Image: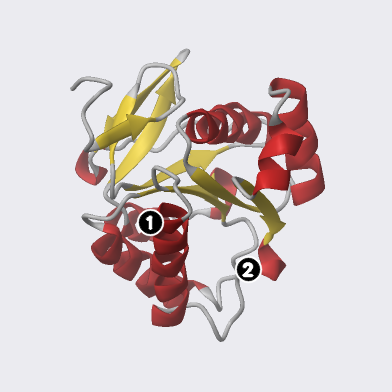
Amino acid sequence: MTRSDAHFTESGLDGLELVPWGTHACHFYNGRDELLASLVPYIMAGLRARERCIWIAARPLPAREAMQALRTAWHSADDAIQTGALRILDFDRWYTSSLIGADLADLWLAEEERALADGYAGLRISGNLSFMTPDGWPAFRDYERSVTDRFAGRRIVALCSYVLKDCGDQQMQDVLEAHNCALERRDAHWQVLPPAQFHKPRQESERDR
């Protein structure tokens, strides 16, 4: 893979470099620090690559705090908001029970089309799913599966963040099956693993939640 290959974009995550367009990936995190360490460089890479970025935030990193973290890491964060290159929203401004399903997948595809029409290289999405309840999970699982199918061949990359302590074995299996791949950080470097090769990360203490 080369940086000039039109089928790939920068991940922003150490050790990964490029990811294919159309990727719908997941990762599991222990707390706020791990979430920051993954999402801030991921979003920065998209902005640097002239992609439109939409960051859907939730506890333990709500939109206001996510924006502050991005400002600290990158001096052009406010410019990105002003130009429309970046939107950071709390989950309840994006996900609703009536939208989770085909309508929400359609909304993402419409956002990609708008981004391309506005001259962006593609659409980059981040969603933290800490708000998900057990009652809402079956419908959301089906939505995640449909997103994987419908993002294929599109100029979209998406990274879904799941709280490790909230995922039992069955839900973790559902998450893995609903995505193209899982991203796992070992030591300082990230790697892409197919679902069958993913090993449940060690759960850390509550210190950074």
Q: Is residue 56 above or below residue 37?
A: below
Q: Residue at x 31, y 70 (%)?
A: 146
Could one spot residue 41 in this view of the protein?
yes
Dividing the picture into quadrants, the one containing residue 11 is top left
Q: Amino acid at mark 2?
A: Trp
Q: Residue at x 77, y 24 (%)?
A: 72
Determine the residue located farthest toward the top in the rendered image. Answer: 188
Question: Is 187 displayed left or right of 177 in the figure?
Answer: right
In the structure shown, which secondary structural element does the residue marked by tag 2 occupy? Answer: loop
For marks 1 and 2 on the same chain, the one whose residue lies earlier in the sequence: 2
Number of the front mark, 1 or 2 = 2
Give the numbered dot on residue 44.
Answer: none
Residue 144 in percent (x, y) is at 38, 65
Please tell me how crowded label 1 is: few (under 14), some (14-19), or many (20+) other residues with Cα within 10 Å: many
Give the numbered dot on residue 175.
Answer: 1
Please tell me how crowded label 2 is: few (under 14), some (14-19), or many (20+) other residues with Cα within 10 Å: few
Residue 168 in percent (x, y) is at 47, 55
Q: Residue at x 50, y 54 (%)?
A: 167
Q: Residue at x 68, y 31 (%)?
A: 205
Question: Is 192 displayed left or right of 201 in the figure?
Answer: left
Disc 1 to disc 2, how far (Cα)? 20 Å
Q: Quadrant of the N terminus?
A: top left
Q: Quadrant of the C terminus?
A: top right
Q: Amino acid at mark 1?
A: Val
Residue 135 in percent (x, y) is at 56, 78
Count of marks, rendered view = 2
Question: Is 112 displayed left or right of 76 in the figure?
Answer: left
- Are the two marked residues, 1 and 2, in contact with CB atoms closer than 8 angstroms? no
In the structure shown, which secondary structural element does the residue marked by tag 1 occupy? Answer: helix
Q: Nearer the viewer, residue 163 or 43?
A: 43
Could one spot residue 207 in this view of the protein?
no
Circle 2 sits on which residue? 94
